[in-house]
Structures are given as C-alpha cells and as structure tokens.
Image (cartoon, coloured by chain):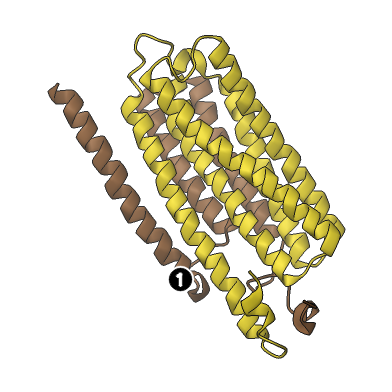
Amino acid sequence: MPAPPQLSEMPTSPHGGEVTIKPYLVGAVLALVLTAVPFGLVAARALRPIQIFVVVGAAAITQVVVHLRYFLHLDLKPASQNKLIALCFAAVVLLILVGGTLWIMFDLNYRR
Amino acid sequence: MTDAVVTAGAGEETEAERALDERAYGFWIYLMSDAIIFALLLATFVVMSHSTADGPGGQTLFRLPHTFAKTMLLLASSTTFGFASVAIAAGQRRRSLAWLSVTFLLGLGFLAMGISEFYGMAVAGAGPWRSGFLSAFFTLVGTHGIHVSVGLVWIVLLGCEVALRGLNPFVASRLCRLGLFWHFLDIVWIGIFSVVYLPGIL
C-alpha cells in the first residue's frame, strides 16, 4: 500500500509541542544530585540509619517526580490530564496493594 | 496496525494524529499496570528481606560502587534517549540513530553488570534457591533485567526501521512509546536501589 501523501507534512513530534534538549539536561542534573545524595549518605554513614532511610525515601520520591516531569513530560496541562488520572489511579491501587501487603505480613510476623 | 490511519485519507491529519495520541495513551496505561507489578515485587521483597535462612544477606552481597555504576549507566541512557527524542522531533535521522546507539550501549552495559552480579552471586552459593530473601531479590531484579533486555531489542528494531525507512510520523510515534518504556524502566530502578540496595547495604 503506498504511503499517504500527508506523511511528510505531519510533524514527527507526536504531541505537537516543541521538543528541546533543555528539560532532559535539567532532569539529568536533578536526577544525578538526587542519586548522589542517598548513595553518599550510605557510603559515609554520616547519619543514624533511621535518618538515612528517611533521606533515601524522600530522594527517591522526589526523583520519581523529576523523571515524570522532565523525561516523561508529564505536567498539569490539560493535554496530560488523562495520563495524570491513570497515574493517580495506579498510585491508589499501588498504595492499597503494597500498604495492605506490608501491613498484613508484618502483623502476621508479629503474632507468630 | 496502521490501517485506521492510512484509510483516513488526505486532509485528515488531525484524525491521524489523534490515533497516534491514543496509542501513546494506551501504552501509558500498560506502563501503569507494569508499575503495579514492580511495586508488588518490591513489597514481596520487603516482606522477605529478613528471611535469609542463615544465608548471606544484603550487607555481604551488595556492593555500593557496583550499584552506583549501574544506576549511573541507566540514568545516562535515559538522558541520551532524551537527546534521541529531540533529534527525532527535529527530523534529524543520523543524529537520532547516533543517540539511539549510545543509549543501546549504555543499556547493554547496565545489563552486563547485572548479569555479572547475578553470576557472581550464584557461583558464591547465593543463588535464588538459597533463601526467601534471595528468591525475592532475583525475581525483582531479574524482572527488571528482562524488561531492559526487551527494551534493548526494541531499540535495535526501531533503529533498523529508522535507518531503512527514515523518520516518518509512525516511526516517530513508535520511538515515542519506546522512550516512555525506557524512561519508565529508569523510574523502576530508582525504587529498586532505594528499597533493595541502599537499605541492604545499611
């Protein structure tokens, strides 16, 4: 089947918006910092373990947001609304399943 | 696969673009379901994290520099895929191929480090059969490794398509979905090193 004539006229960027190198650089630098900090803390053992756990968790959550924002281009504009809703739904399912699993299994461990 | 778009005929670009957008959305839904799989494997690992059956634990098995190097390789590959996306959007075929190749090599390095880690552990008697902790570890990290392998094959296939047919909106939309997949794998890796490796070493 011959290619339709409009092929070359359509933009190769599927979402229409301009794609620049800047968000990827910003995301890479932020991700680098948010990776180096928890690894550095674990290597140096500068804080008490519980404090390190908190920093590792906070850095991980922040880095997930950075990746979503700068690499996956998820933002609060109407164009990404559907994706955001799917993400929130997945997050709710995930919290119920993971939270429930950990709650039940550690409770069982405790009662044994 | 492209029937709906091809039969749309001339003058209906918006229709074709909408179809490509819908595919990106469908792929996003798949990624969300995949995220739930990984989250459950992580939860299983946390439940199993103390069930070492007197075998080796994370403190003796995991090495911080090795994990850091893997993390850096995957982050770098995610960034270079971003550069490839920019080149694709600008219609620069050669440059996008170059960045895709760099991404492939970095991903291959990540995979090779993972395989050598698995092999070293199995040879040292710390294979998945040793304890519940190790079963959960191999399942989780192995599932991520399989995803990365699939991503690498996918990069090669789409790289060939770009090289042979050039950049058109359909190829660009496939590359866009591959990009979502690749960046998603990096996000999963954040969860793995934060839940498995760093607490294990501590």
**Mark 1 crowdedness (10 Å alpha carbons): few <14, some 14-19, many ≥20:** few
Residue at image location 53% in from the left, 21% down from the top:
A43
Q: Position of residue B191 (x, y in %)?
A: 46, 39
Q: Quadrant of residue B74?
A: top right
What residue lies at 64% left-to-right and 55% top-to-bottom?
A: B179
| Tint of chain B | yellow
Q: Nearer the viewer, residue B17 or A65?
A: B17
Q: Colour of chain A?
A: brown
Observer-nearest of A65 and B16: B16
Q: Is residue B94 left or right of residue B28?
A: right
Residue matched to label 1:
A81
Q: Chain of mark 1?
A: A
Callout 1: SS: helix
Tell me the kind of residue under disc 1.
Gln
Q: Pinpoint residue B157: horizontal percent, then vertical percent.
A: 73, 51
Count of number-bearing discs: 1
Residue sticking out furthest to the left: A111
Task: Name the residue at the front extreme.
Answer: A1
